[in-house]
Amino acid sequence: MEYNDDDISDEEYEPTESELEVSSEESSDECSEDDSGSMKIVFRDTFFQQDPNHPVFALHQKALTFAVFKQLLASCNKLDVLNMSLFSSNSTIPDIVLIPGCHTAFSDITVFNFFQKGIYGDAERAKIICFLNILGYSSRNISKIGIIVDTEIEETYISNLINVQEDLKYLTIKYAQGRTNLQSFLESIPQTLVYLELYAVKLSDCSFNALFECKNLEEIKLVRCRFICHKLDQEQVSESEGLKLRKIFWKENVYNHYKYFVSLIRGANKTLKEVVLCLPANRVRDVTDTNEILNALAKFCPNIKLFAILDVYSYYTQLVKVFESYPWENLTSLTLGSEHSYSVPYIAIDRLAPYLPASLRKLRIACAVSEQDLKTFFDKCQAPIEELSIPNLNQIFTNRHLRIIRDYIKEKRTLKQFDFEFSHNQVISYELWKEIKEMVDTRTHHLFDPFYYPPCDLF
């Protein structure tokens, strides 16, 4: 079906009989009313057969979408959830904000998810911006916003949607094709926020200072973000106090000034429970900065329950000192990871054994460990480990390793679950593996990985 924006207006367009049948089917199947009386409309993309969990308003043909919107809005006065997906560079974005009644329909939206892929050109970008502005003007009660785009959109227009929300709690922004220039939208972010997730977003000094004011923030995920920070003294960093931060996921961020991270840690203090660190170790400064972060975690956050660190080899000496000086008495889960596909160099894990707290129950060894160091570790470790996980991705663990674990199970009698990447084409003895399976519960697939972050491509 060919369509030219200049040839027809929405007032002139009359849908064909077949289009009305599609519209009727979509509205009858997907338009529903919940117990509270609010409406939820789902318009699925039948052209590209997208995952049914990724809905809604796939705007490939302007005329058909106009017809569907008009029919649905005639039946459903207001929307509660709006999921919008735009696909392919050939898509035509309809001016849905011109549809009579759309402002009223948008006024009660509480969840807004926006996925955009392959929409290029100033005209298409202008329509997206117009839609975001109208949505921000119409709805002030959105509690959850998720935006994933691969086209640059100035932060001002996203700010117009985000900063006017009076009860925004969950915010996710991902830029799929690289690091966007978003910097200023965090400067006036709603302080009602409890969850923040940013992927490939640039952040400035002011962005972090704004985060320190979000006293209700409980979880933060920053992945592949770029920090525009200058050299500064600790005195120039705003002190954060009274934060309710419980979880930090920090992965592959570059040019991060560690003093902002330290201030965030100090503000969270005793509330911080889970920390996952995937920090760079390419320069001497990276290692020095990470050591400062580890010191701050140990000194100010005594109630950490889950701790995971990638590329542990680069920071291992400091990590041992941290556990020796500031034992985390509430720690229940520890992951030691390697950035080199769990291969050499080996980690002297036995050095850490005497300082592990008695509260530790789950241990994940995702790095290379020699047979002798593993045996010494189990001999010295006093923590009653109940769950042991070893992702043997490079098949570096041998029968000797498994015999050491088998003996540990027999002697200590605390281990209840053993997760191991076992396959029949490995050098591991099946009889030995079968013996371990008879002693404890085992899992061989889908092992929990605290460092895992889903690819930024939902299309």
Image: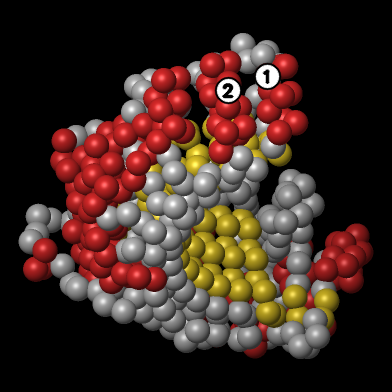
Report the number of numbered marks.
2
Task: Identify the residue at image location x=38%, y=39%.
Answer: 353
Quadrant of residue 280 in the image? top left
Quadrant of residue 114 in the image? bottom right
Q: Amino acid at mark 2?
A: Leu
- The reply to whether residue 199 is in sight is no
Q: Left or right: 456 with respect to 19?
A: left
Q: Check disc 2 and report the residue beneath it.
A: 402
Within-10-Å neighbours for mark 1: few <14, some 14–19, many 20+: few
Q: Is residue 144 above or below residue 306?
A: below
Circle 1/circle 2 CB separation < 8 Å: yes
Position in image of residue 262 (x %, y %): 23, 60
Q: Amino acid at mark 1?
A: Leu
Mark linked to residue 432: 1
Q: Left or right: 294 with respect to 396?
A: left
Mark 1 and mark 2: span between their CA atoms? 8 Å
Q: Earlier in the sequence, mark 1 or mark 2?
A: 2
- The reply to whether residue 330 is in sight is yes
Residue closer to the observer: 77 or 220 = 220
Within-10-Å neighbours for mark 2: few <14, some 14–19, many 20+: some
Task: Identify the residue at image location x=61%, y=27%.
Answer: 406
Instruction: Give the residue furthest to the front.
Output: 411
Q: Is residue 368 above or below residue 280?
A: above
Position in image of residue 51 (x %, y %): 73, 50
Mark linked to residue 13: none
SS assignment at label 2: helix
Task: Identify the residue at image location x=13%, y=56%.
Answer: 230
Position in image of residue 239 (x %, y %): 19, 73
Residue closer to the observer: 205 or 54 = 205
Task: Identify the residue at image location x=67%, y=59%.
Answer: 59
